[in-house]
Image (tube, rainbow, N blue to C red):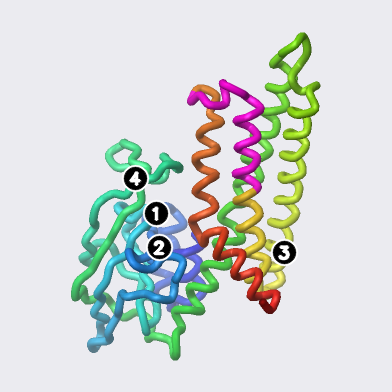
Amino acid sequence: MWTVQRPIFRFGSDEQRGRYLPELCRGNLIGAHGMTEPESGSDAFSLRTTAKRRGDFYILNGSKTFLNFGSRGRRVHRFCHDRQDQGIPRDYGLHCGAWIPWIPRREADREDGITHGADGRVSVRGLPGPCGQPPGEGGQWRCDFNDAASWERTCILASLIGAMERQLATCISYAQQRRQFQKPIGKFQSIANRIADMKVRLETSRLILYRAGWAKQQQRSTAMESAVAKLYLSEAWVKSCLDAVQIHGGYGYTVEYEQERDLRDAVGSTIYSGTSEIQRNIIASNLGL
């Protein structure tokens, strides 16, 4: 939504919006976002993929990796060096490489009814792609990327508010029912304090998320707010997941109680859409450091 549909809506031509957005919104088309490359991760502007104008086409050369739905996407939104980003149909000739299995997010990709839980690699060598809009002057693609990244960092972890609410309710119920030393474990301060910290993280995360969303609604520049939201929500989620495992004791370390599933997902949230280290760099930069 944030890295394919939003850029088409904001920067695409009327023809591109009409062709792609209705089908993407209906789910008939699945988009994939091609930013990360084998040699370019956090250093997002050191891309090696190129797009050279040749009449009515661009000739694309390069490789992308860690594409969510990269193996299934019927439209891949690729970022290219020195030219505007290019959105090209999957059936136009992309070569899909090996699967990259993930630890978390095992429902991220399915093929023939089987969950693979992996992101894909795609590469092109001399592929002619349709021009669409003329490239912008002096790095228009950076505006596209920054806009998409800002929306993604603001909103991608919004679902964690619901997840943290569910997790908190689960831990409270368990702490009330599980008894040790003739009383519920929630009566022990060491357990109660963990649950109290989880509640504080939940409410703080909610306020930070809503503030970033409000800033977006006001059409303000939100580089700072988006980075704060991405950083805090992801790291708060990891800490609360670790607390949930500890509260459940031995059961928290089993697959049956599903606390391990939350923890696997939580670790990934500190990496995708910009690592915690990058978010801290953005925050520091916006503070003039």
Q: Quadrant of residue 248?
A: top right
Q: Secondary structure at mark 2?
A: strand
In the rendered structure, find residue 101 and report the number of the disc placed on it.
4
Question: In the rendered structure, are the residues bearing label 2 and label 3 in contact, judged by CB atoms less than 8 Å apart?
Answer: no
Vertical placement of 285 versus 169: above or below? below
Residue occupied by mark 3? 214
Q: Quadrant of residue 106?
A: top left
Residue occupied by mark 1? 68
Q: Earlier in the sequence, mark 3 or mark 1?
A: 1
Mark 1 Cα-neighbour bin, 10 Å: few <14, some 14–19, many ≥20: some
Check disc 1 and give the amino acid type. Asn
- In this rendered view, identify the residue nearer to me: 9 or 282: 282
Discs 4/1, front: 4
Vertical placement of 250 versus 207: above or below? above
- Picture coordinates of residue 226 (x, y %)? 63, 64
Residue drawn at (44%, 79%) of the image: 141
Q: Earlier in the sequence, mark 4 or mark 1?
A: 1
